[in-house]
Amino acid sequence: MPTPIPRSRPVMPSDAATAAPRVIAVASGKGGVGKTTTSVNLAAAMVNAGQRTLLLDTDLGLANVDVLLGLSPRFTLADVFAGRCELADTILEGPNGLMVVPAASGKQHMAQLSPQEHVGLVHAFSELDRPIDTMIVDNAAGIADGVLTFCQASHDVIVVVCDEPASITDAYALIKVLNRDRGVQRIQVLCNQVQDASEGPALFEKLQRVTTRFLDVTLNHIGSIPRDEWLRRAVQRQEAVVDAFPSAPASVAYRGIARRARSWQSPMVARGHVEFFVDRMVAAGTGPDGGLPA
Ligand SMILES: Nc1ncnc2c1ncn2[C@@H]1O[C@H](COP(=O)(O)OP(=O)(O)OP(=O)(O)O)[C@@H](O)[C@H]1O
């Protein structure tokens, strides 16, 4: 069992006003649909647009944000949990000032953190003394507890989906459990690897039909990313496509989504921030000390 992150002091409203990151979780039911690609490119597009952005890789079992960006972590979250360093020590400087917190690749036990440890991790961001406007959280695929906890604790959840039956079925399963078990009522849907302009809206429509029928959740189609050969070339160069090939179709699409993300209405506009994390954990009974706020 890894050592839990030391609990931070209680989060006061003034702290929240200083930290103030808007937190966006990126998830998918099925693996391999483009979740990490999306996290990296949205984060890069946001940083290029002047937002102070931190990309957190929580795919603790199988990390790859740092690989995609060609970064070499000195410390990872595994070191934080083992008490070998502070969270701030794990932050890598990515392209154009993007802050990247790498996960711990291949450390199987890191994929099995308790809800309290997930909360501790998220809560620890309130201790960071550098200003962050937006935090993008790249999750593992599937519906493991940690994924649900990170999604539940974020202001927005982007579910990445492709037009193939397993992706749609698994996206539905993820949305269902987020909605029914974790009280998430709004999901941002990103359709990836579309072949033409009509595929994204049609795919969104399919997903929406089934969720409207069975769930009390609002889906919002935030945009579609074309299947793009330039994106694969950028991966080979270990760069975000928005940086390597800014005029590629996928880059244009990611920039558009990043721009529009600013106007998504936060479900708790007046509150938000780190305080929002803790409140939502506690509301669901997954807070530190079995439901009591730290
Ligand atoms: N729009 C796209 N056009 C072309 N290739 C893409 C696109 N999106 C993703 N890919 C490719 O698909 C593969 C899977 O992408 P990615 O690693 O982002 O998926 P993932 O959902 O994060 O997977 P995992 O859950 O296994 O981490 C990668 O090789 C990536 O380069």
Image: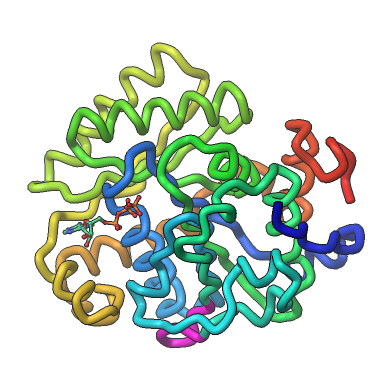
User: How are the residues colored?
Assistant: rainbow
Residue at 45% of width from left, 61% of height from top?
106
Magenta stretch: give its range: 93-99
Residue 275 position, x and y percent, is: 78, 53
Residue 84 position, x and y percent, is: 72, 76
Identify the image quadrant of residue 148.
top right
Residue at 40% of width from left, 38% of height from top?
220
Residue at 75% of width from left, 71% of height from top?
83
Give the left or right position of residue 294, taking residue 257 as reference.
right
Give the left or right position of residue 56, taking residue 166 as reference.
right
Does residue 270 appear in the picture of this structure?
Answer: no
Residue 8 position, x and y percent, is: 86, 63
Q: Nearer the viewer, residue 225 or 5?
A: 5
Q: Nearer the viewer, residue 226 or 79?
A: 79
Is residue 230 inside the magenta stretch?
Answer: no
Q: Nearer the viewer, residue 174 or 11?
A: 174
Up/down of 12 relative to 141, above or below = below
Q: How many marks?
A: 0
* Residue farthest toward the top in the current orientation of the protein: 213
Give the left or right position of residue 79, taking residue 257 as reference.
right
Up/down of 256 relative to 285, above or below = below
Up/down of 145 relative to 107, above or below = above
Residue 268 position, x and y percent, is: 68, 44
Does residue 117 appear in the picture of this structure?
Answer: yes
Split into quadrants, the picture shows ligand 1 in the one at bottom left
Is residue 95 inside the magenta stretch?
Answer: yes
Residue at 47% of width from left, 37% of height from top?
187
